[in-house]
Image (cartoon, rainbow, N blue to C red):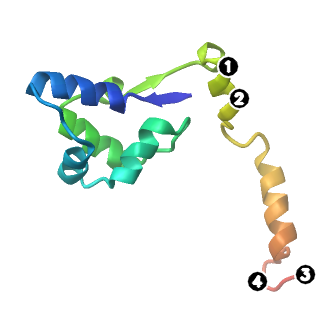
Amino acid sequence: MIRIRLAELMAEHSFRAGRRVEWREVAEATGIHRATLSKMVSSIGYNATIANIDRLCRYFECTTGDLLVYVPDEDAPAAVKASFKGPKANTEAAGAGARARYGKRDAGGSST
């Protein structure tokens, strides 16, 4: 899984600035909503957009390797493993569920 090191970068940025940097300040400077920043910090396996990663790297003057860290599943704590759902195991099963809900469509676009 990919871990977003946003809290650590905030702490380092605050230390370098010699003052406490607020989430509001990061949100205003990056254009990323505070709720989104909070989800990045607190949600296991949060799916961040490339645009948001770019904005954060620009703000913190860092590389993606400073912001994002790969943690092998076997190295993740047990509590994280239990809460992280990861990618869908079988995409065909997901497609079958959608077809069952909305009806299978033939090539002409009509429902069968």
User: Toward which corner of the image does residue 58 lie, by quadrant?
Assistant: top left
Identify the mark nearer the N-term, 2 or 3: 2
User: Toward which corner of the image does residue 79 lie, by quadrant?
Assistant: top right
**Which mark lies nearer to you, 4 or 2?**
2
Q: CA distance from mark 4 to mark 1?
A: 47 Å
- Residue that mark 4 sits on: 109
Q: Is residue 80 above or below residue 50?
A: above
Q: CA distance from mark 4 to mark 2?
A: 41 Å
Which amino acid is tagged 4? Gly
Q: CA distance from mark 3 to mark 1?
A: 45 Å
Residues marked 2 and 3 touching at CB (< 8 Å)? no
**Badge 3 element:** loop
- Residue that mark 3 sits on: 112
Say left or right for 28 vs 45.
left
**Badge 1 element:** helix
Q: Front-most of 41 and 105?
A: 41
Q: Which x, y percent locates residue 60?
A: 20, 33
Circle 1 residues within 10 Å: few <14, some 14–19, many ≥20: few
Q: Residue at position x 34%, y 30% from top?
A: 7
Circle 3 residues within 10 Å: few <14, some 14–19, many ≥20: few
- Residue that mark 2 sits on: 82
Q: Which x, y percent locates residue 27?
A: 25, 50
- Residue that mark 1 sits on: 78
Which amino acid is tagged 1? Ala
Q: CA distance from mark 1 to mark 2?
A: 6 Å
